[in-house]
């Protein structure tokens, strides 16, 4: 008799934040984690930038009106580690689940830089790692900076490697292959609330294809527009008309590309589904993109996973030929060139005033 692969339960959280309030949104997130844990979920996915909310305002206001909102978002950003992440870790430990949390990560080295981040927490309450969105999409570039490939990782869990991508990243073939080549079995796709059917179609295409191509389970978690958010984002009746529905479209998808739960366009809820690893085997026997159904002798994916360096590097030298080259991204500081001789002004003639 061969190996057996136990089924397990996964959860997609579909919820609205307590908009721009880090403490209250963290408290709500912890309640949702514990609720999903009580239902037996072993992996729990959350929407994009859930803590303390996604910067939706550029869809409804001109950019110069949004600076006070951006400032509030930064002030409620989450540093890793911090009291907010400590609370999330405690909730994950109570739930005995791997949690993938969307948040606005504040860089402790500055008073102005935010990352769009997925935080990975293990069932023992330890931080496994994080993924920073590599390229902020569209107007997000007015709020977030890009991450680097050092966070393009999947993380070991009791039910297999778990990875994640944020919103439009799920379209990128290089990002997908980078995670799948690390053995990803459960993928968390995090999204904000999106108004209208057009963007829901985009989510469906991306998530179902990810599951089908990678032969993995996809937890697709979207946000929800609360009435409080609508009032803040859209102060005029004309702006309010732009938000159609709840903005939700969460689902859980099997390695065949079929829905196991959802898609759900209602309000706040947690979607659950049973994941059977043997479905992965069934599908990969035919098409294993990261194994027998590829030609790695012909194609190579090269990833520069060095963390980006933002701090200056200074090196001292001891004699000629002893200086080591600086990292490629860091330009050495150079002093201005000094003239070989001081100029001689002794023969200069004074200027004569005309008239």
Image (tube, grey):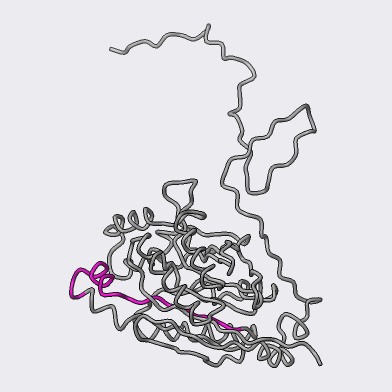
Q: In the shown orientation, is residue 7 left or right of residue 263?
A: right
Q: Is residue 107 above or below residue 29?
A: above
Q: Judge whether residue 220 is colored magenta.
A: yes
Query: What is the span of residues highlighted in magenta in the rendered image?
Result: 217-238
Percent x, y of residue 127: 57, 61
Q: In the shown orientation, is residue 118 left or right of residue 353?
A: right
Quadrant of the image containing the C terminus: top left
Q: Is residue 264 above or below residue 163?
A: below
Q: Residue furthest top?
A: 346
Q: Judge whether residue 84 is colored magenta.
A: no
Residue visible at 53% across and 72% down?
Answer: 169
State how many labels appear.
0
Q: In the shown orientation, is residue 246 left or right of residue 238?
A: right
Q: Foreground: 50 or 160?
A: 160
Q: In the shown orientation, is residue 241 left or right of residue 280?
A: left
- Say which quarter of the image contains residue 298: bottom right
Q: Foreground: 193 or 348?
A: 193
Percent x, y of residue 86: 49, 58
Percent x, y of residue 199: 41, 82
Residue visible at 59% across and 40% down?
Answer: 312
Residue visible at 56% across and 82% down?
Answer: 218
Percent x, y of residue 217: 59, 84
């Amino acid at each position: 008799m061969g190996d057996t692969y136990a089924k397990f339960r996964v959860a997609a959280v579909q919820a609205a934040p307590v908009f721009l309030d880090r403490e209250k949104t963290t408290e709500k997130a912890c309640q949702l984690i514990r609720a999903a844990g009580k239902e037996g979920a072993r992996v729990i996915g959350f929407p994009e930038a859930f803590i303390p909310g996604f910067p939706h305002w550029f869809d409804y206001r001109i950019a110069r009106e949004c600076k006070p909102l951006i400032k509030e978002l930064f002030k409620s950003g989450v540093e890793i580690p911090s009291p907010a992440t400590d609370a999330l870790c405690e909730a994950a430990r109570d739930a005995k689940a791997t949690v993938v949390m969307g948040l606005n990560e504040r860089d402790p080295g500055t008073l102005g830089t935010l990352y769009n981040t997925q935080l990975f927490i293990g069932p023992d309450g330890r931080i496994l790692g994080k993924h920073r969105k590599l390229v902020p999409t569209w107007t997000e570039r007015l709020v977030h900076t890009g991450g680097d490939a050092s966070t393009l990782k999947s993380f070991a869990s009791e039910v297999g490697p778990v990875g994640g991508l944020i919103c439009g990243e799920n379209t990128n073939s290089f990002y997908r292959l980078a995670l799948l080549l690390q053995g990803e079995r459960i993928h968390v796709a995090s999204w904000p609330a999106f108004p209208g059917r057009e963007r829901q179609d985009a989510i469906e295409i991306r998530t179902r294809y990810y599951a089908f191509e990678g032969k993995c389970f996809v937890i697709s978690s979207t946000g929800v527009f609360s009435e409080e958010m609508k009032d803040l984002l859209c102060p005029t009746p004309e702006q309010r008309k732009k938000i159609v529905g709840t903005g939700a479209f969460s689902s859980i998808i099997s390695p065949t590309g079929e829905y196991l739960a959802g898609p759900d366009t209602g309000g706040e809820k947690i979607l659950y589904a049973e994941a059977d690893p043997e479905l992965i085997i069934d599908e990969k026997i035919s098409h294993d993109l990261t194994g027998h159904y590829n030609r790695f002798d012909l194609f190579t994916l090269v990833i520069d996973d060095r963390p980006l360096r933002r701090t200056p590097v200074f090196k001292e030298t001891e004699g000629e030929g002893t200086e080591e080259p600086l990292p490629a991204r860091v330009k050495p500081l150079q002093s201005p060139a000094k003239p070989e001789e001081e100029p001689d002004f002794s023969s200069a003639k004074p200027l004569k005033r005309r008239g």
